[in-house]
Amino acid sequence: MDTDRRKRAVFCALAVALVLLRGFVATSYEGFFFDSDQAIVGLMARRLSSFREFPLFYYGLNYLLAVEAWIIAPFFWIARSSVTVMRLPFVALNAITAVSLV
């Protein structure tokens, strides 16, 4: 029984390490694949974190919910808004998903 726990812990640590390694480049280099769609999400999160607007849908689209902006907004409220801070919550969510799948 103890070896099963140890194997699970090793697999969880390996999964988190791989997710963090994969997300390192995209998170640390702000110019790495940043397009206009991500900029719109960043603007929505920035306005949401400053309590100016509360978007439910993407700007210009009445059919796509702005869930990403609502996930990013608390991080913009805590830290200065940047591409790195915008991508950190999703690296954390990917790590949590990897652990839950193991």
Image (cartoon, rainbow, N blue to C red):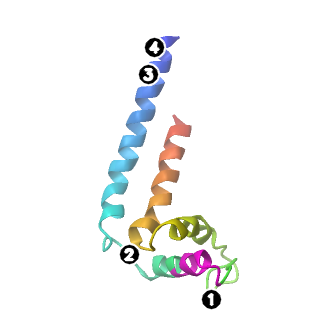
Above or below 67: residue 92: above
Relative placement, left or right, of 34 versus 8 is left
Numbered badge on residue 34: 2
- Mark 1: which secondary structure? loop
When asked about the image quadrant of residue 15, the answer is: top left
Say which residue label 1 marks. 60
51 is within the stretch colored magenta = yes
**What amino acid type should be assigned to the residue bearing mark 4?**
Thr
Ranked by sequence position, the earlier of labels 1 and 4 is: 4
The Cα–Cα distance between marks 4 and 3, rounded to whole angstroms, is: 6 Å
The Cα–Cα distance between marks 4 and 2, rounded to whole angstroms, is: 44 Å
Q: Position of residue 63 (x, y in %)?
A: 69, 78
Range of residues picked out in magenta: 43-52
74 is within the stretch colored magenta = no
Q: Position of residue 39 (x, y in %)?
A: 46, 80
Q: Position of residue 54 (x, y in %)?
A: 68, 79
The Cα–Cα distance between marks 3 and 1, rounded to whole angstroms, is: 48 Å
**What amino acid type should be assigned to the residue bearing mark 3?**
Lys
Say which residue label 3 marks. 7
Ranked by sequence position, the earlier of labels 4 and 2 is: 4
Do labels 2 and 3 touch, CB within 8 Å?
Answer: no
**What amino acid type should be assigned to the residue bearing mark 2?**
Phe
Do labels 4 and 2 touch, CB within 8 Å?
Answer: no
Say which residue label 4 marks. 3
